[in-house]
Image (cartoon, rainbow, N blue to C red):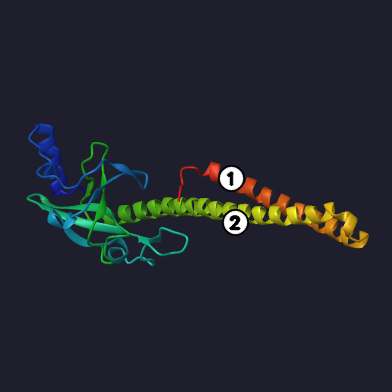
């Protein structure tokens, strides 16, 4: 069933007298970004122009309380529903929380689902807005986890490369000392000279393994070059 508020909006648009309530004052800053298959814009102070209705998991009585944004499960993304009261009734907005600056009840900064022209999408029921918000939060959190995994892989490659180069430097110093001893073979017993040559061989083998590690790390760093620590 189509709500009376929606019918009034459609009639106003058809007659050319419709004015969006979202154009009365600036609600946010920044450009729309991809979120959950659609677009969203960040609102730093949504409480100044809308009312917090609740979180998606509370309104829909879901079995979860959000979606983890990172592999260590430190931050959570969840859906938030906010309401805007107009003379035609309440418009419900699908939002997602700010996992770093928002509150557990959904208050604080949030991202609001918008259309291609930058104006918010609204829903006639809080349940419909809650479902859209939860789906948007799930997709955004999944992308955040993928980014976190790639960033972690890049940082791990950087640390591993640094450790491998330090090992190579230490092995070079050790190899030079062995070579110096072998060159003094005239004053070293044949048995000791053979031992030194064996140690030198092991050092070179270990250095080759470290260089293999360095190459693998650099390949990873090149593949994930946009994830700089």
Left or right of residue 117: residue 136: right
| Residue 167: quadrant of the picture | bottom right
Left or right of residue 193: residue 124: left
3 vs 43, nearest the viewer: 43
Which numbered marker is on residue 218? 1
Residue 158: give x, y in percent of width and height. 54, 51
Q: Nearer the viewer, mark 1 or mark 2?
A: 2
Residue 144: give x, y in percent of width and height. 41, 52
Position above or below: 108 against 224: below
Q: Dot 1, how many residues are within 10 Å of its Cα: few (below 14), some (14-19), or many (20+)?
A: some
Instruction: Name the residue: 32% across, 60% down.
Output: 100
168 vs 152, nearest the viewer: 168
Q: How many marks?
A: 2
- Give the residue at mark 2: 163
Taking the view exactly as shown, the residue that stands out farthest to the right is: 190
**Secondary element at tag 1:** helix
Spatial CA span between label 1 and label 2: 13 Å
Instruction: Name the residue: 50% across, 50% down.
Output: 150
Instruction: Name the residue: 84% across, 54% down.
Output: 182
Instruction: Name the residue: 44% across, 59% down.
Output: 70
Taking the view exactly as shown, the residue that stands out farthest to the front is: 187
**Secondary element at tag 2:** helix
Left or right of residue 151: residue 211: right
């Amino acid at each position: 069933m189509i709500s009376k508020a929606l019918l009034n909006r459609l009639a106003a648009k058809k007659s050319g007298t419709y004015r969006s309530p979202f154009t009365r004052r600036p609600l946010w800053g920044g450009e729309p970004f991809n979120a959950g298959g659609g677009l969203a814009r960040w609102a730093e102070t949504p409480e100044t122009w809308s009312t917090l209705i609740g979180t998606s998991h509370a309104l829909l009585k879901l079995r979860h309380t959000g979606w983890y944004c990172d592999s260590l499960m430190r931050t959570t993304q969840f859906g938030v529903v906010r309401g805007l009261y107009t003379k035609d009734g309440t418009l419900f907005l699908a939002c997602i929380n700010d996992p770093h600056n928002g509150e557990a009840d959904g208050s604080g900064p949030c991202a609001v689902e918008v259309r291609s022209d930058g104006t918010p999408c609204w829903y006639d029921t809080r349940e419909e807005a809650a479902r859209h918000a939860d789906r948007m939060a799930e997709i955004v959190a999944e992308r955040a986890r993928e980014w976190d995994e790639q960033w972690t892989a890049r940082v791990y490659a950087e640390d591993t490369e640094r450790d491998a180069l330090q090992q190579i430097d230490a092995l070079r110093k050790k190899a030079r000392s062995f070579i110096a001893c072998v060159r003094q073979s005239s004053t070293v017993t044949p048995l000791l000279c053979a031992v030194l040559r064996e140690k030198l061989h092991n050092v070179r083998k270990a250095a080759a393994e470290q260089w293999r590690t360095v190459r693998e790390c650099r390949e990873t760093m090149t593949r994930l070059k946009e994830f700089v620590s």
